Image (cartoon, rainbow, N blue to C red):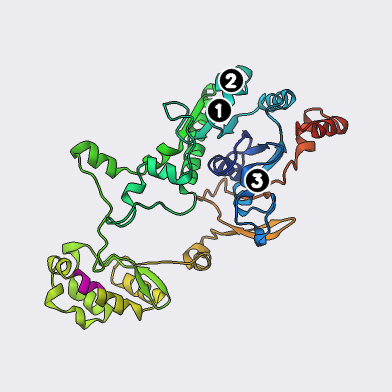
Amino acid sequence: MTSGALAGVKVIDLTHHIAGPYATKLLADFGADVLKVERPGGDPGRRLPPFFHDEPHRDRSLPFLYLNTNKRGITLNLKSDEGLAILMDLLADADVLVENFAPRVMPSLGLDAETLREHNPRLVVASVSNFGRTGPWRDYKATEIVEYALGGLMYIFGAYDREPLKHALHQAQFKAGTNLASATLMALYHQRLTGQGQQVDVSIQESIASALRDVTNNYTYVGAVRRRQPNHTGDLTRLRAVSDGYVLPNPGIGASLDWQILVDFLEAPELDDPRFENASARLENAEALGEILDQIFAIKQKQEIFYAAHQKRFIYGVIDSPAETIGNPQIQARDYYVPIEHDQLGEITFPGAPFLMNKSPWAVNSTAPALGEHNAEVLGALGYDAQHLAYLTASEVI
């Protein structure tokens, strides 16, 4: 029987919301023993919509259920002396502590990395925050759109004559979570070689800024500022509506495009016109070209034109709905989406492995824990009996 790549790695997870839980999910799904420690009221991520069957409940948030597979869960009040003592007991033989509090919080609790490594020199302390643990903005609060804006990525998205746009939902959080998991594994590798832990510091702002790549290089090398691209209606790579949805055409760029091949492919003799005979002419007559292209594509079907385009070596994309994405033949062939059986909610379909490893594969062995689900199991292993657990519950330590 195969085991996860990270089998034997013990992780204490103090994270909440999205970026931190996604990092620890990646570790857990590849075999790490991840213990999620929540405040007695629960991770705020439990209140993230959408909810299973649209019924709000702390154990029915679909993002929370996705982000916390394969983890055990306990509750601890870290503002109490006994809660802190329990955490220190848990950290005594841990490999990694992951947290995404504001940078001031852990030191205020006496849990700064230096103190923790005095307690356990092998401990990797992995942190993710809005702007990192240092710098003049380290304590600033931020939302997803603020991270996109201050990371510089919003500047290059959207129409050039309109306001900048950001990608939907929580992409900055997931990007930072991926970076945190990767950096944690590097620190863990160093720990295995040397026996020494270290601090990992991930900034969500920098995670977004890292995606700029050529934009930054162009500016630092030659002073060029990339702007959002013009989106005239005659743009051959513009999103086009078809009879059953949308396609994203790309028949070729500039001089590489043989116009007659495109005319024949689209079965559109009206495009065989001097106004469109070369790139300059097409730009000059962009609006007329756009109107004709819209009419041509409007009677096409997206799957039909997608496969026909690839026969011509054109790079076309189909805009799939969520249902179509799950049913996509390429995704189905690789078994990407996986059904997960929840003992209370039944079967839920979630995204699967972020990458494949045939010797130590990704797997979901347990669903996200209910709030405090493993209190008795975990604290019992530390020597707390039922009477003491009742006291801790009554005094709001757990």
Secondary structure beneath dot 2 equals helix
Task: Kindly identify the residue that appears in the image at 62 percent across and 54 percent down.
Answer: 62
Neighbour tally class for label 3: few under 14, some 14-19, many 20 plus, Cα within 10 Å: many
Of the image marks 1 and 2, the number of the one nearer the N terminus: 2
Q: Quadrant of residue 289?
A: bottom left
- Mark 3 and mark 1: span between their CA atoms? 21 Å
**C-beta proximity under 8 Å, tags 3 and 2:** no
Horizontal and vertical percent position of residue 299: 35, 81
Magenta stretch encompasses residue 252: no
The vertical placement of 308 against 280, above or below, is below
Marker disc for residue 117: 2
Residue type indicated by callout 3: Asn
Circle 3 residue? 70
Secondary structure beneath dot 3 equals loop
Magenta stretch encompasses residue 288: yes
Q: In which quarter of the image is residue 251?
A: bottom left
Circle 1 residue? 125
Most frequent secondary structure within the magenta stretch: helix
Horizontal and vertical percent position of residue 29: 60, 45
* Residue 350 as seen in the image, left or right of residue 139: right
Secondary structure beneath dot 1 equals strand
Neighbour tally class for label 2: few under 14, some 14-19, many 20 plus, Cα within 10 Å: many
